[in-house]
Every structure is written in C-alpha cells, then in structure tokens.
C-alpha cells in the first residue's frame, strides 16, 4: 500500500476528487458537511487495476487548519497537488507545496481541477504558472492532469497517472522500529478505544506488546485493521487501525505515538532536539534566540523555545542548525522531518530534520563540541556514522545510532564498509575515528602527566579519580582506559592506571615527611609510634601511602606501621613457634621482642586477619593460610 495525500487551497476540490475516484466522501464530520469544507483529515481507498491499494489522505485547505494538513502529510508517500482552474495558485497552494517539500516527499502529481469553469487559453496559462511555481522541486517533472470533479472529465487520465505513481513509489522500509503517529482516536462498540495512523518503520502484529507516547504506558495489540479489513500483521506504509488491551482510553490521544519499543525513557532524558531548519522564502519573521515556536512531527505538535548555534538570526530562505527545547519531550528519531510554525499567529516558518537528541541546551562555550552536527546536514548514512564517532570518541557498535531512522542492518553494513576502507577503527566492542580518539588519548595523558608531576609519589590513579581529568564517563571512560593500556600509553596495576614507564619518586615537602616517618620507624622497629602520631596532616598521609605502596612497611591494624624487615622477623618467629609446638601464647611473643600488650594484641590480630594464625582460647594455632 502507498499513501497519497491531497494538498492545495481551500475549495479547490480536493475532497470532490477523492470522492469521484473512490466513491467515499472523506468529509466525515457533520460540521464539515454543514460548512462544505474539510476541517480534519479524511481517508479513502483506491484500488489500481493491478490490485494495489492506494490510501488517499484528504487534508483541509483552510489556513486555520494547516496543522491538520501537516498531520496528514507527515505519513504520505506522494502528493496530489490540487489547483482550481478558476482560482489559480493561491496562498495555501504555496504553503501546502512547501510543507510537502520540507517533509521530504519525493513523488507526486499536479491536478488542475474545475476545468469546466475556464477557457482552454486560460488553462494553458495556469499550467505554465504552476510549472514555474514548482520548478526545481520534486514536482518539477510531475505529470499534470486537467480534470473536473463535477463532470468527471479527465479522470481516466488521472487514474492512469495514479497507477503509474503507485508503481514508482517504493514500499516503506521495515527498519525494525515500528511507530504509528495517531491521527484519529475514537471508541468502537464492543472493542473500546481505537486509534488510526500510517504505520512506519516496522510491523505491528496482534498480541504484540507496545508502548504509548507520551504516557509511556504499555499494552498489547488486540486487533488490527488495514484497508477496512481485519489483519494479523500490519506492514510499514499501511493505513492502520489498532485497538489495545491494558490501555486506558484517556491515553489514546491524537498526536500520540504507538511504538514497538518497550522503553521510551531515552526521549524524556534527552528532550532538547538539535535540528536543521530551512526557512521559507516568505517566512514573515526570523528565528532568533528564545523565540517560541511550534514543532510538528508526524501528528505530534510541541511548543518550545529555540537557540541558534552560530548566528544571531535565521532569516527567510536561510538554513542552519538550531536547538529546540520543547515544553514536553517529543518522540522523534534522528532523520525525522518536521515543520516549524509560529504558535500565534499560526504561520509556517520552515521545516527540516532532526539531527540529534541532547540532555540540555548547549552553552555558548560548548558550541565547538557540536560541530559534528554540521556533518549531518547531508542526509547520508555514511555522514551520520562518521559524525556519531566524531561526537562520541568511542561508541558501542551494538547501540550505534539506535535512535535514528536507519535499521541495525543498514548501520552494520555501513560500518563494515567504512572499516574495510579504514575510515574507522575498532577496539573490542567500540568503534572510533583515529583523529577523535587520538585527541582524547592526548588530552587525558597530558592531564595525568600534570597531576603526577605535582604528586610523583603516587603509583597512579584509580578510574573514579581519573573522571576529573576527562569529560568521558561510565563505559566510555573504561573503554578509553582499556585502549590506552592496550596501546601502552598507560600501565595498570590492580585498579590503578599510571603512565607507562613512569617511575615513582618523592620531592619537596612529601620527601621531607617521608624521611621523618622512616626515621621514627627505624628508632624502635618493634615499638613504632601510632599512625595518628605519624600522620598529622595531608602531606604525611601521602608519604605513608607511598611507604606502603613501595612495600617498605606493613600496616598492622588501624594503629601501627612496622618496617617490612621488622614485620618479616615477627612472621618468621610466629611460624617457627607454630611449627615447633603447634601453638603460641601472648607471653611468648611479648618476651621474644620485649613488647607490651599495646603492641602484642594488634600484632596477633593482624596475623589472624591474614590467616597465618587462628585464635583458640588463650593461644594461637596455625591459621587457614599458614602454608601460603
């Protein structure tokens, strides 16, 4: 099935053309019939001679209902641009044409209606004017059908052109990311809440679990209809009606989205959209910082504030990167097309594509970090992949561009091609650009060198302390550290990372504290001062940390530090006593080294802790780790 939308000025006969083609009056609302004008979206189905189904979306032409027109145009494959022969190209003709162009529609035809009301000479002039209006656009070479919905004249040719158009338009791709933007919501007797829309990006099946946006409520598909028939599975591009189980009716609202994703939290956590915007040639006002605008994507419309990236204003006919913060988060994928309008008065300013999802507005001093967005102005998968690696330093290949409108297979194939061309590299599960990764490595190395220059006694830094030296966090920082170890920029001992080949040393006040502490320990090796006496300040604690890391002393409990030679002598004696008699008393060790209980008890508690000994009543016996 393909979806063709009508477009054009009010009263140019869009609904009449649909009714003449299908026998269905798309104006379904009583108010529409009473006023003789389309207010909301209407739908009808046309079947080609080859059995293909064409869904016709009839949109309102009045300027007050342009947002409804945008909602209908958001899911179409092609457009039938309708111009009344007696009126010619009118303001809404221009606005609808520009909207379909900005929404990325690539196929269409031009229908000049009401030919029975004008002379042939006038018709020729009008056709020339319309051709001039659409020059340089996707409609430049589109067929022109001259018809009268009143008399039926020209409809044989129109049907033939529709047949040709149905054969030209590619089927909507299944990218494994099913979304249905709700354009109608109603209650059906015996079924309950039902929504309709044009399915895009993937399939829906009866019994499938889905999530509703913006409520993020979960439910299951109860029934599916397409082309007024019950189906088990609906495919991308089909006009689809869906009912649910487990979902309250209040959440089934027009402008909402039905998604096959189970978790949509990402979009709430990244509400700011980086977008490309093309301003219309007749945009009445420019985009400037803090201007309130309405962004319409699919059938969803959200009001919010804009910030510009590299200029003070985006004027008519200009294009650029803009940041948009909606009052309520929107569910969009990178690559989605949208329209920008003023909230009041309701005027279309332009449109564009979503480039990225951000957590917050960038600050002016951060704008250089968003240069990668300029690479995305070209709607190209290669540019998108390369810009994502430019942005992310190291990107997990399994989640690469998962919030874009490309399938995982498309992304995987493109990554394979770029790797084969040596345009990107891989480290474990992570992909990278050589230049971007080299810069991250250089920056972290320089920051670490500076830190260790001031504290050369440190044997390195743990990962949590390295966070203060880089903007990278979580798994990306871990992956960067793994890469730097693998390429011998860093060395790792236990949980600490150090510059490869760097020697540990002391200097200045830390060296002086080290000398004082070592002198104190040497004066009475078996009766050292308490740690609280040795470590009177930050410098002394750093010196003690160095002494322990270099193995020059052993910490005994919370209170004492013994020189390694003295501690080894104690251990040798304890082992010998246990080997000889199988047990050892407090008195034995006290008499051997001339110690008081102040030292003996912490020593034996430490030998218990390390498993050399085990307490049994008043004596010690061999511990669990005695042999090792």
Image (cartoon, rainbow, N blue to C red):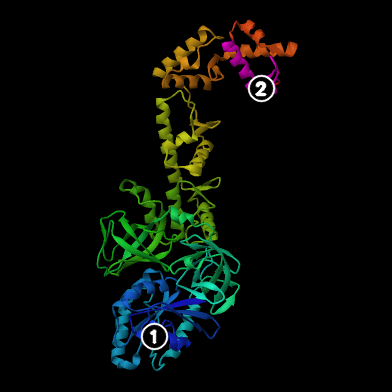
Q: Which callout, 1 or 2, points at the residue further toward the start of the chain?
A: 1
Residue on which disc 2 sits: 611
Q: Toward the viewer: 58 or 494?
A: 58
Question: Can you say whether 184 is above or below 546 in the image?
Answer: below
449 or 257, nearer to the observer: 257
Please tell me whether residue 544 belongs to the stretch shown in magenta.
no
Residue 622, given in percent of the width and then of the height, sits at 71, 18
Residue stretch rendered in magenta on the structure: 597-626
Determine whether the residue tagged by mark 1 lies in a helix, strand or loop.
Answer: helix
Residues at marks 1 and 2 touching, judged by CB atoms closer than 8 Å: no
Q: Check the image and report above or below for 114 versus 176.
A: below
Q: Is residue 136 visible?
A: no
Q: Is residue 316 left or right of residue 187?
A: left
Q: 621 or 106, which lies in front? A: 621
Q: Who's the residue at 34% across and 91% down the image?
A: 115
Q: In the picture, which quadrant includes the C terminus?
A: top right
Around disc 1, counting alpha carbons within 10 Å, would you say few (fewer than 14), some (14 to 19), or many (20 or more)? Answer: few
Q: Residue at x 42, y 39 (%)?
A: 470
Q: CA distance from mark 1 to mark 2?
A: 91 Å
Foreground of the two, 382 or 267: 267
């Amino acid at each position: 099935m393909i979806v063709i939308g009508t477009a054009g000025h009010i009263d140019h006969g869009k609904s009449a053309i649909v009714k003449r083609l299908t026998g269905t009056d798309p104006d379904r609302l009583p108010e529409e019939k009473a006023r003789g004008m389309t207010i909301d979206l209407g739908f009808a189905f046309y079947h080609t001679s080859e059995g293909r189904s064409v869904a016709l979306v009839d949109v309102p032409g009045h300027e007050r209902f342009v947002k409804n027109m945008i909602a209908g145009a958001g899911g179409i494959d092609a457009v039938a641009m309708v111009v009344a022969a007696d009126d010619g190209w009118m303001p809404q003709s221009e606005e609808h044409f520009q909207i379909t162009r900005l929404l990325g529609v690539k196929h269409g035809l031009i229908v000049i209606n009401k030919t029975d009301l004008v002379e042939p000479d006038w018709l020729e002039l009008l056709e020339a004017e319309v051709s001039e209006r659409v020059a340089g656009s996707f409609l430049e070479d589109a067929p022109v059908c001259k018809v009268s919905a009143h008399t039926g004249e020209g409809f044989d040719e129109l049907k033939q052109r529709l047949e040709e158009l149905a054969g030209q338009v590619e089927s909507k791709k299944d990218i494994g990311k099913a979304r249905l933007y709700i354009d109608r919501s109603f209650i059906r007797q015996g079924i309950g809440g039902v929504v309709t829309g044009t399915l895009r990006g993937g399939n829906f099946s009866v019994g499938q679990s889905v999530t509703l946006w913006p409520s993020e409520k979960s439910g299951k598909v109860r029934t599916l209809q397409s082309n007024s028939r019950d189906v088990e599975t609906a495919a991308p591009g089909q006009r689809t009606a869906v009912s649910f189980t487990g979902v309250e009716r209040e959440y089934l609202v027009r402008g909402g989205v039905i998604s096959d994703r189970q978790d949509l939290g990402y979009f709430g956590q990244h509400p700011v959209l980086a977008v490309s915007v093309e301003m219309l040639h007749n945009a009445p006002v420019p985009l400037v910082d803090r201007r309130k605008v309405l962004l319409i994507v699919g059938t969803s419309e959200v009001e919010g504030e804009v910030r510009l990236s590299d200029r003070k204003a985006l004027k008519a006919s200009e294009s650029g990167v803009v940041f948009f913060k909606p009052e309520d988060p929107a569910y969009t994928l990178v690559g989605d097309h949208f329209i920008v309008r003023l909230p009041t008065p309701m005027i279309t300013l332009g449109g564009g594509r979503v480039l990225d999802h951000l957590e917050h507005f960038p600050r002016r001093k951060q704008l250089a970090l968003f240069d990668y967005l300029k690479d995305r102005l070209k709607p190209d998968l290669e540019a998108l992949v390369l810009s994502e690696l430019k942005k992310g330093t190291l990107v997990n290949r399994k989640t690469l561009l998962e919030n874009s409108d490309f399938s995982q297979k498309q992304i995987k194939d493109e990554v394979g091609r770029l790797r084969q061309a040596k345009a990107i590299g891989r480290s474990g599960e992570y992909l990278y650009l050589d230049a971007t990764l080299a810069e991250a490595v250089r920056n972290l190395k320089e920051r670490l060198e500076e830190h260790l220059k001031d504290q050369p006694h440190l044997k390195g830094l743990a990962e949590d302390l390295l966070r203060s030296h880089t903007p990278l966090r979580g798994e990306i920082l871990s992956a960067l550290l793994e890469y730097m170890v693998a390429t011998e920029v860093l060395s790792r001992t236990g949980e600490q990372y150090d510059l490869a080949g760097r020697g540990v040393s002391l200097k200045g006040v830390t060296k002086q504290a080290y000398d004082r502490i070592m002198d104190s320990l040497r004066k009475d090796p078996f009766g050292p001062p308490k740690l609280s006496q040795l470590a009177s300040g930050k410098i002394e604690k750093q010196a003690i940390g160095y002494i322990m890391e270099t193995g020059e002393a052993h910490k005994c409990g919370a209170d004492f530090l013994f020189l390694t030679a003295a501690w080894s002598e104690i251990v040798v004696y304890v082992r010998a006593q246990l080997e000889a008699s199988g047990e050892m008393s407090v008195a034995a060790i006290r008499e051997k080294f001339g110690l008081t209980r102040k030292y003996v008890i912490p020593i034996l508690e430490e030998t218990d802790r390390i498993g050399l000994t085990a307490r049994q009543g008043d004596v010690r016996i061999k511990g669990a780790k005695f042999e090792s």
